[in-house]
């Protein structure tokens, strides 16, 4: 995945798309838009940085998992959690340098203190069926959508078309070309995990 | 439908007044997903976070589900209304009885209040019902404050449109004066977001004037911090630089598309032809005066003075050029705090980037190419000098000739020749006898030009007596209002208020003022609502559970001058339809209004008003076979079917649109860049103000209210005047408080959306008060401290300080309209900051031309 920071305006649409498509419970966002400010008035920059699981080629979360619940899919490069194998030990949460993982004890509803709405019943069912409870969870590039030939939801809904999804192994793909021509970079490369999410600089 | 069956229903979003094309997935009877509809120009499948959070509104346990009656006879802010559930029958019996009683006496005593979020439904559905009842009284919640009276005035006058955007496809350099366009708020928000990102990638520069580092400022090319309310004087200084220092202007455009060549007499009025009364121009080739539209004109003089019939006349352009000389960059710098050299540089860049004289060939047609735009809205226009500020910013477009030209500043499309098969919808600007433009389609009953002919007031706002017939917060809301109504001899007082989705206790100004001076005067209040609001709690007698935008039907969600994407591409006509049957006992308000019209015996008038509304706002004419017959009773579905068949023929009625959601057809170059092709002019000189001023002033004197507004503002050329906040010199009140629109919220109603609330907690700014770090430190305020913000009248608000660098040191910035206190909205309760508490009502806080309320407040800030 490539995220073009020149196009991104930090509108939180991707964060909402992720919630809507993955039914993450209240308090859990697999994808977050971080806002930061640099400099001193009047020379100031404000930046938005959307980030989620980096789908590393050499994922530390996979290495520390005692039950092999976390596995990098060789074909797609997506790092998957098998909920039936996950024992919720949270080693992976600690191991991830990007803070991309969230342990979910119980699916919490969106309207605190209220009975489940028809939508929440559906959302909870979907979550429990796919992710279970008492398990570690994270973004999987909407693996199900990708299997069906679709893009991850955050890519399709982004109002500024700031996200690109494709094959990094294909040097002629759009993502590879963008990384090459627009000085694409990875976050925290010093951890040596070789993330599959690249960013294009704003300027 | 079986529980496992899945369908996608095409409809229009309504989380904001954008009305994106959406598809809602239903599994069984439950709506489970909202995504964008890829084929519609209203977003091409993209969505903002508000729209994606729609299901949290649909299924919110706090929604109003049944008709409610006030159990506590006491009214007031903070009073527990003790709601009691009643039946629809009982509710409509009460409403009918009350309405009948007042209608028999004087229907004008019935006042309407509507939301801005669902503008089309407010204006067509409730507007037509109001006309059928026979009342001239209505306002829009937040109108005059959150909306843009000055901006609509200028955009209407110059572009026949509600607002304007850069021609994203070709524009290279855009000035953004306190405006979001493409950064998450406002009209056509998502289509603009796509376009602005493409434009930036292509290399378009955006220079943003804003007191704080907003979404557009932080992602634009350059942020120019500016003192709130001073944009107008900077624009005037830039005009001065362009006209008098650099001599950059598009003479050809000015001669043919504006009143710049019109000859002005020493008394300020046009020199007119004796026979035809048409304004005259000077033809320098034949050295004689001719009517502006004389076919024999060889050229137009823009400069100099000429003698006609023994009277010395000057072209309007020469007067403008001289007039702006007093707005030196130095003076503008002192007032705005923008360095003089920056003002000079931006003016030069704007003028040079305009590439005056260049052309572009589009679709075989050669057109002027002017890739610059001066774009304005909420922030810059929300001030006491609103109308002139907007005109000043717009004049930058006019003098370089970029208005509605390729690359320039485009209105939301005001020219439509209709679908190729039916020629409908049709709306095209035309020329008045003096050559100036009359809008083809407009949202108000009165078009932006010609101005209103002042007449004896009939409405509680007394708006008929003013040249610009917009909402006037002063005449309605001040403690003088009863005296004014008496002087105007209205002969009635407000008695019943009918509200549609608006929370005027929170959205107009200081709630106590609004309640005591105005809302408390009503004997009976009925609200069509989705949530119980502070307004319902304070004054409503009956609350009727409305369907939300995902449960309602409307045949014309998107079109024309209000929120249709500008520029080349496609036209789209899109409907809104219920994705689920209204839940519980909620009902689409239109079904209720149709039933009420029958009960009140005003069906014929309601039908007539509805047809007129679709014609004037959407350009749809009803052929005889689809006209509404008052002898018959139609359902709302049947009426929508007739609207659609009128516009798109017998095969494309409601059933077709329910299946397809929308229809598109290609825009023509002659529609998009209409100005080049149409013989209409716009004013760089406001001669018509002089005449209307005298008439309105005379009328005001006759009515015993000579000082009702400051008549000296009605001049022929634009000026800058300070806001009340600029005049406040007490050292204690040292900061300007402003509020801004945030991508996560629409007006006051999204605070109750649980997903948007959760997202708001992620955002460092929207629920907090942004204050410059150095300023805060001097006051002993640390990041995260609770602080009070207090105005000179002692009204104060509380919120959490967010210390930032990205804000002008003299300002604090507050996002949206937070700080709800009703128990009816438990998610919203206490979240965010309630800016409007700080807004006062008074002539000194209002633009005397457009009546826009000033929204910059001088405050003191201290630790709570």
Image (cartoon, rainbow, N blue to C red):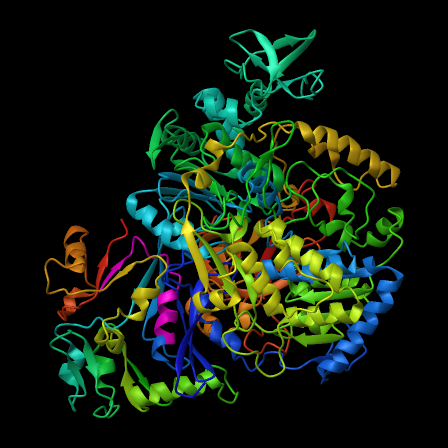
Residue at image position (18%, 57%) is A174
Looking at this view, is A153 or B434 the one in front?
B434
Residue B721 position within the rendered picture, expressed as x and y whole percent measured from the top left: 63, 36
Instruction: Inspect the magenta stretch and tell me whether residue B734 lies in it.
Output: no
Residue B314 % position (x, y): 61, 15
Give the vertical position of B24 relative to B669 (above or below): below
Quadrant assignment for the N terminus of chain B: bottom left
Residue B508: quadrant of the picture: bottom right
Relative image position of residue B624 (x, y in whole percent): 64, 55
- Please indicate, yes or no, whether residue B70 appears anywhere in the rendered image: no
Q: Is residue B807 left or right of residue A168?
A: right
Q: Is residue B8 left or right of residue B735?
A: left
- Reply yes or no: does residue A18 show up in magenta: yes
Which sits in the foreground, A65 or B118? B118
Give the magenta-colored segment's residue range. Answer: A1-20
Image quadrant containing the C terminus of chain B? bottom right
Residue pictured at 67% horizontal, 61% vertical: B628
The image shows a total of numbered marks equal to: 0
Q: Nearer the viewer, residue B730 or B442?
A: B442
């Amino acid at each position: 995945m490539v995220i073009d920071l020149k196009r991104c305006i930090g509108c939180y649409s991707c964060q909402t798309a992720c919630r809507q498509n993955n039914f993450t419970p209240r308090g859990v966002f697999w994808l977050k838009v971080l806002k930061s400010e640099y400099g001193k008035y009047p020379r100031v920059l404000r930046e938005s940085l959307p980030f989620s699981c980096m789908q590393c080629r050499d994922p530390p979360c996979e290495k520390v998992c005692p039950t092999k619940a976390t596995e990098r899919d060789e074909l797609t490069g997506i790092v998957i959690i098998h909920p039936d194998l996950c024992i919720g030990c949270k080693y992976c949460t600690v191991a991830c340098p990007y803070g991309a993982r969230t342990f979910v004890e119980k699916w919490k509803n969106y309207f605190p203190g209220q009975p489940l709405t028809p939508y929440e019943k559906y959302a909870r069912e979907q979550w429990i069926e796919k992710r279970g409870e008492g398990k570690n969870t994270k973004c999987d590039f909407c693996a199900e959508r990708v299997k069906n030939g679709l893009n991850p939801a955050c890519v399709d809904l982004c109002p500024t078309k700031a996200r690109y999804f494709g094959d990094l192994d294909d040097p002629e793909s759009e993502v590879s070309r963008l990384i090459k021509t627009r000085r694409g970079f990875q976050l925290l490369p010093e951890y040596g995990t070789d993330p599959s999410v690249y960013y294009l600089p704003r300027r | 439908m079986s529980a496992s069956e899945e369908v996608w229903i095409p409809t229009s979003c309504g989380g904001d007044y954008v009305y994106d094309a959406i598809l809602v997935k239903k599994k069984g009877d439950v709506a489970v997903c909202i995504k964008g509809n890829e084929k519609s120009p209203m977003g091409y499948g993209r969505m903002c976070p508000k729209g994606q959070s729609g299901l949290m509104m649909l299924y919110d346990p706090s929604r109003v589900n049944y008709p409610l009656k006030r159990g506590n006879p006491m009214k007031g802010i903070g009073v527990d209304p003790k709601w009691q559930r009643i039946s629809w029958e009982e509710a409509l019996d009460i409403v009918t009885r009350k309405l009948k009683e007042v209608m028999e006496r004087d229907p004008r005593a019935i006042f309407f209040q509507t939301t801005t979020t669902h503008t089309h439904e407010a204006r067509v559905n409730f507007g037509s019902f109001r006309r059928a009842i026979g009342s001239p009284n209505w306002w829009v919640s937040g109108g005059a404050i959150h909306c843009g009276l000055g901006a609509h005035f200028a955009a209407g006058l110059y572009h026949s449109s509600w607002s304007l955007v850069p021609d994203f496809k070709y524009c290279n350099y855009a000035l953004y004066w306190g405006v979001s366009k493409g950064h998450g708020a406002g009209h056509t928000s998502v289509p603009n977001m796509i376009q602005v990102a493409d434009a930036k990638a292509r290399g378009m520069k955006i220079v943003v004037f804003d007191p704080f580092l907003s979404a557009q400022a932080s992602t634009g090319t350059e942020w120019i911090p500016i003192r709130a309310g001073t944009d107008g004087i900077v624009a005037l200084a830039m005009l001065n630089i362009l006209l008098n220092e650099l001599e950059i202007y598009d003479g050809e455009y000015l001669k043919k598309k504006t009143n710049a060549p019109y000859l002005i007499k020493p008394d300020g009025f046009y020199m007119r032809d004796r026979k035809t009364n048409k304004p005259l121009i000077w033809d320098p080739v034949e050295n004689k005066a001719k009517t502006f539209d004389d076919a024999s004109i060889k050229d137009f003089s823009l400069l100099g003075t000429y003698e006609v019939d023994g009277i010395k006349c000057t072209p309007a352009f020469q007067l403008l050029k001289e007039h702006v000389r007093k707005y030196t960059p130095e003076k503008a710098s002192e007032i705005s705090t923008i360095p003089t050299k920056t003002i000079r540089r931006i003016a030069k860049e704007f003028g040079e980037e305009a590439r005056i004289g260049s052309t572009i060939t589009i679709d075989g047609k050669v057109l002027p190419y002017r890739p610059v735009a001066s774009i304005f809205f909420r922030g810059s226009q929300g001030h006491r000098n609103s109308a002139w500020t907007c005109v000043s910013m717009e004049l930058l477009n006019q003098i370089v000739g970029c208005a509605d030209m390729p690359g320039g500043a485009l209105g939301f499309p005001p020219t439509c020749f209709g679908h190729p098969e039916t020629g409908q919808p049709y709306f095209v600007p035309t020329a008045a006898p003096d050559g100036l433009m009359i809008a083809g389609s407009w949202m108000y009953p009165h078009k932006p030009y010609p101005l209103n002919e002042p007449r004896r007031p009939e409405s509680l706002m007394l708006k008929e007596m003013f040249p610009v017939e917009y909402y006037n917060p002063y005449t309605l809301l001040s403690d003088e209002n009863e005296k004014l109504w008496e002087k105007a001899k209205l002969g009635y007082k407000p008695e019943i208020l009918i509200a549609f989705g608006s929370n005027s206790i929170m959205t107009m100004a200081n709630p106590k003022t609004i309640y005591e001076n105005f809302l408390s005067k009503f004997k009976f209040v009925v609200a069509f609502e989705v949530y119980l609001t502070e307004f319902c709690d304070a004054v409503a007698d009956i609350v009727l559970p409305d369907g939300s935008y995902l449960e309602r039907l409307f045949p014309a969600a998107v079109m024309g001058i209000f929120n249709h994407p500008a520029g080349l591409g496609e036209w789209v006509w899109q409907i809104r339809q219920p994705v689920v049957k209204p839940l519980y006992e909620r009902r689409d308000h239109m079904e209720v209004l149709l039933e009420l019209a029958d009960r009140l015996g005003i069906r014929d008038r309601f039908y007539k008003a509805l047809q007129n509304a679709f014609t004037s706002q959407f350009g749809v004419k009803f052929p005889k076979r689809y006209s509404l017959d008052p002898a018959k009773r139609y359902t709302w579905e049947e009426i929508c079917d007739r609207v659609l068949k009128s516009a798109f023929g017998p095969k494309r009625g409601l059933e077709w649109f329910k299946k397809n959601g929308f229809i598109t057809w290609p825009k023509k170059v002659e529609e998009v860049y209409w100005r080049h092709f149409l013989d209409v002019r716009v004013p760089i000189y406001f001669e018509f103000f002089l005449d209307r001023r005298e008439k309105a002033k005379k009328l005001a004197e006759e009515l015993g209210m000579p000082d009702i507004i400051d008549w000296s503002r009605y001049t022929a050329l634009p000026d800058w005047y300070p806001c009340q906040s600029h005049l406040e010199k007490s050292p204690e009140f040292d900061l300007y408080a402003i509020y801004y629109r945030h991508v996560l919220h629409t007006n006051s109603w999204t605070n109750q959306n649980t997903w948007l609330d959760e997202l708001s907690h992620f955002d460092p700014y929207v629920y907090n008060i942004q204050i410059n770090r150095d300023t805060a430190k001097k006051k002993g305020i640390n990041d995260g401290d609770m602080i009070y913000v207090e105005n000179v009248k002692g009204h104060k608000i509380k919120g959490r300080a967010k210390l930032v660098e990205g804000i002008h040191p003299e300002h604090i910035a507050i996002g949206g309209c937070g700080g709800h206190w009703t128990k009816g909205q438990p998610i919203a309760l206490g979240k965010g900051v309630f800016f409007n508490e700080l807004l006062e009502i008074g002539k000194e806080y209002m633009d005397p031309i457009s009546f826009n309320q000033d929204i910059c407040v001088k405050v003191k800030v201290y630790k709570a």
